[in-house]
Structures are given as C-alpha cells and as structure tokens.
Image (cartoon, rainbow, N blue to C red):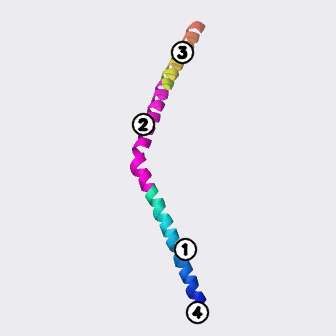
Amino acid sequence: MSTLEERIAADEQRLKAVDLQIATILEHVDNIRDNHLHTLQGDMNIVKTDIDWIKRWLWVVITASTGSVIATLIGLILKKT
C-alpha cells in the first residue's frame, strides 16, 4: 500500500510542477500581449502602408498597359479599313 501512496505523492509533485510551468507560460503570454501587442500592430500598419503603395503602382501600370493595348487595337482596326 505504501508504494501506491508513494506513486500518488510523486504524481502530485509532477502535477504541481506542470501547473507551475503552465502558470509561467501564461504569465509570459500575458506579458507579450500587454507590452508588445501595440508594437506588432504598428509594424503591421507599416507593412499595410507598403502594400497599399504597391497596389497603387500596379493599378497605374495595369491602367497604362490596358490603355496602350486598346489604342493599338483601334489603330490596327483603322489601318485595315
């Protein structure tokens, strides 16, 4: 019977250690969320701004390309007739 009690005591010690590790991890996650989340959001805003610039540039390129294709087609049609 004493081995069963020893096993139970050992399991309880391991569970206390695991509970302590979980509490430490949760504390670190809360620290990161509370102290670093605004920095991450600021970095994401910078990335979003950079992507918006690329979108605008691509829009200009696509518009100019489409316009030149249409102008070329109209020129070819008028040249044939």
Question: Is 22 placed above or below 42 here?
Answer: below
Judging by the rendered image, the residue that carries numbered circle 4 is: 1
Q: Position of residue 7 (x, y in %)?
A: 58, 83
Residue depicted at x 42% and y 42% = 39
Judging by the rendered image, the residue that carries numbered circle 1 is: 14
> Could you tell me which quadrant the C terminus lies in?
top right
Between circles 3 and 2, the one closer to the viewer is 2
Judging by the rendered image, the residue that carries numbered circle 2 is: 45
Instruction: Identify the mark nearer the N-term, 3 or 4.
Output: 4
Distance (Cα) linking label 3 and label 2: 35 Å
Q: Badge 1: how crowded within 10 Å, few (<14), some, or many (20+)?
A: few
Distance (Cα) linking label 3 and label 1: 73 Å
Distance (Cα) linking label 4 and label 1: 20 Å
Between circles 3 and 1, the one closer to the viewer is 1
Q: Residue 32 in magenta? A: yes
Tag 3, which secondary structure?
helix
Q: Amino acid at mark 3?
A: Ser
> Could you tell me which quadrant the N terminus lies in?
bottom right
Instruction: Identify the mark nearer the N-term, 4 or 2.
Output: 4
Q: Amino acid at mark 1?
A: Arg
Q: As drawn, is 54 to the left or to the right of 42?
A: right
Judging by the rendered image, the residue that carries numbered circle 3 is: 68
Mark 3 and mark 2 residues within 8 Å of each other at the beta carbon:
no
Between circles 1 and 2, the one closer to the viewer is 1
Mark 4 and mark 2 residues within 8 Å of each other at the beta carbon:
no
Magenta residues, start to end: 29-56
